[in-house]
Image (tube, coloured by chain):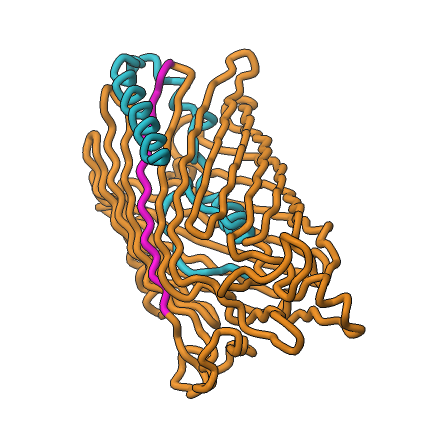
Amino acid sequence: MLRAVVVALGCVLTLVAPGSARAQVGEFDTTHTVFYEAPTRTHMFVYSPSGDVTASPWSWLDVRGGWEADVVSGASVSTKAGGVYQASHAADVVSTASVRDLRNMARGEATVKGDLTSLTAGYAYSTENDYRSNSLHVNARTDALQHNTQFELSYAHNFDGVCNRVQDGSATSPTLWVALEDSSGCFTKSATRVTDTIGIDTIETSWGQSWTPIFETQLTYTAQLVDGFQSDPYRSVILGEGIKAQEHVPDERAREALTARMAVYLRALRAAFRLSVRGYYDTWAIRSGTVEAELEKSFGESFRLMARGRLYSQTGAVFWSDDYTGGAPPLGPRGQYFTGDRELSPFWSWLGGLRAIWTLRPAEGRFIGFIESFKLGLSGSVTGFSYSQYTLGGIPVSNARAYVGTLSFNVVF
Amino acid sequence: MERKTKRLGIGSAAACLLLASGCATVAPTQRAVLADPTMQFDGEAKHDAALRHAIDNREGSMGGTGVSGGGCGCN
C-alpha cells in the first residue's frame, strides 16, 4: 500500500517538477495539526500530518494526490455507568482503557475544467488498527450569470469496515454481547474477530450567490445515509445489576443539514466578516444548531489575521440515557438501544481561535526561477464542552476542553 | 402534513431567492473585493481540515463542509 502511495506521489511530482515540458502549474501543501483534550478520567493526544501535491499539466486538468495520518495516544471510557448505579456500589464501576492507533489515508482526485464548469472524481483509502475505509466521491460545479451564481453538487460513497468481536453463539440478545478487548487479530483470519460493514452515502448541493460587489451568500444542503455497525466496539454500558454489554445503537441513520453562509466586506476595516448558521436533524432525533462567525483582516498585501468564534448546541439521541439502570427521568432504560457515547448526549460547546496567513510573492518573475509563491499558516483554537446529562458514574465532566494547533505550508510552482 | 407544508414553504422561499438572484448582477470589473482571499468561504480549507475533522468527531452532527473524506479517526 505504502509503495503504491509513493509511486502515485512520484508520478504527480514528476508532472510538477521544474523543467517538465508539460507542467504549467503545480502546488504542494503540508499541514501539521496537534489536538489535545484531557477531561475527567481520559485524555487524548492526536498528531495529524498531511501532504498534498497538485499538478495542472494542461489548463483543463488538475490532478491531486495526498496522504494524511492521525497518530493517536490517550485513554477513553471503556465501561460507562451513571450515578444511580454508582451510588449503590462501593467500588468504582467506570473504567478506562488506553488507546494507541495510527490512521493512514491516501487520496487522489482529478478535476476536468471548462470555462464555467468543472467535474471532479476522487478516491481515498484509509486504514486504522480497527477500521478500513474506501471512499469514492464525485463533484460537479458550474458558474452562471457572469460568475455571480455558482451551483455545486457532490456525492460520496464509503465502503467501510470496522473490526468487532465474534460473539458467543448463545448470546442472542445484544444485552449479552461483550465489547471488543483490543484490536489484535483485526482484519486477519482470526476466529475471534469479524469485520462489520458500514455503507455511507453523502450528497451535498450548494448555491453560491454574489449579490453586490461586497456581499455574497451560500446555501448548502447535506444529506447522509449511514447503514451498518455504528457503535464503539470497545465500549460497554452497564444495564443493570451485573449486566454489562457492548454499546448497541441502530444500524441505520439518516442525517440532514442546511447551512447558510454570508460574507460581507467592511471597507473601513479592510476586513471581511463571515457568518455561518447550520441546522441539523437526524433519525436518532438529534437536533443541533451551529453559529460560526469569522472576522478576517488583511495587513498589507501579504498578511492576514482571522478571529473565529463558534457556538454549538444539540439535543440527545432518543435512546440516550446517562444511566440505563433507572432513576428519575431523563434517566432509565430507552428501549432496545443503549450507548455511553457523550457525542449522543445533549450538550453545548463553544470555540474560539485565531489564524494567521502569510503569503510571499516576488515583486516580479518567480523565486529561483520557478516558485510563484509561498504561504505559511498558523492557527490555534480552544473549544469547551458543557454536558447537561453525561456523567462518569455520577461525576459531571465539567472540564472537557480541547486545544487544536495547526501549522501549514504551501508552495505554488 | 404539517411537515410537508413546512418543506413546501422552504422550497418556495428558495425558489423565490433563486429567481431574485437573476436580478443581482455584479459586473466583472466590480469583482475585485469578491475575489479577495478574505471573502472566500473555504479559502484555507486544507489548513482548517484537521480542525473540522476534530470538531466533527466531538459532535453528533455533520454537514456543510463537503462530502469527501475517508476513515473514522474517531478516537
Q: Quadrant of residue A59?
A: top left
The region drawn magenta spans A197-212
Front-most of A392 and A216? A392
**Is residue A177 left or right of A52 when viewed as pictured?**
right
* Figure colour of chain A: orange
Coordinates of residue B32 in the picture (x, y in percent): 38, 18
Q: Is residue A274 above or below residue A269?
A: below
Does A148 appear in magenta? Answer: no
Q: Residue at 65% of width from left, 55% of height from top?
A: A390
Q: Quadrant of the N terminus of chain A?
A: bottom left
Q: Position of residue A155 (x, y in %)?
A: 28, 48
Which chain is painted in cyan? B
Tell me what residue is drawn at x 48 percent, y 74 percent: A174
Residue A37 percent across, percent down from the top left: 66, 54
Q: Quadrant of residue A411?
A: top left
Residue A36 shows in this picture: no
Nearer to the camera, B24 or A1: B24
A50 or B74: nearer the eye? Answer: B74
User: Could you tell whether A68 is left or right of A158 in the image?
Assistant: right
Q: Residue at x 42, y 66 (%)?
A: A229
Main secondary structure of the magenta stretch? strand
